[in-house]
Amino acid sequence: MAAKGKPPQIVQLSTAELEQLLAEVRPLLPPATYGLIESLLRTLVWIMGLVEQKQTTIARLRRLIFGEKTEKGRKMFPEAFPAPTGEWPLHKAELS
């Protein structure tokens, strides 16, 4: 999903209005779909609250949303990054 085009319309709802909206859509949706939508809306409310506090930096928001950058891909997925052998993958005979 790209962030191109015109920005979406910002909708402001109180907590009571959000709860009312969720109550209205709950019987119309399968439980898994409702759970996903509820989680997405609650996450959005949480992020908007952090932004409104104006004490949260972009770097902190990034860490909260995506997690700390503590692992390298090489450590998390060692099978995708074979250990270096000191040799090129191609042998001299394969180059000629």
Image: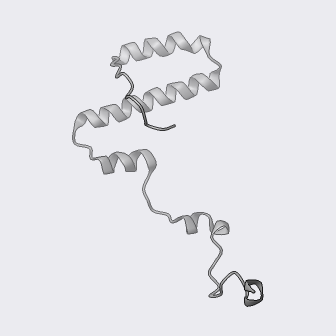
Q: Position of residue 80 (x, y in %)?
A: 65, 66
- In the image, is 39 to the left or to the right of 62? right
| The C terminus - image quarter | bottom right
Q: How is the image coloured?
A: one colour
Residue 42's quadrant in the figure? top left
Name the residue at 41% across, 31% down.
5
Q: Is residue 17 above or below residue 37?
A: above
Q: Nearer the viewer, residue 16 or 3?
A: 3
Q: Residue furthest front?
A: 96
Name the residue at 63% across, 22% down.
31
Q: Nearer the viewer, residue 81 or 63?
A: 81
Q: Nearer the viewer, residue 75 or 9?
A: 9
Q: Is residue 19 above or below residue 94?
A: above
Q: Is residue 27 above or below residue 82?
A: above
Q: Position of residue 70 (x, y in %)?
A: 45, 62
Q: Position of residue 87 (x, y in %)?
A: 65, 87
Residue 55's quadrant in the figure? top left
- In the image, is 23 to the left or to the right of 45? right
Name the residue at 36% across, 35% down.
47
Q: How many marks?
A: 0
- In the image, is 49 to the left or to the right of 41? left
Name the residue at 71% across, 82% down.
90
- In the image, is 87 to the left or to the right of 10? right
Q: Is residue 39 above or below residue 21?
A: below
Q: Residue furthest right?
A: 93
Q: Position of residue 2 (x, y in %)?
A: 48, 38
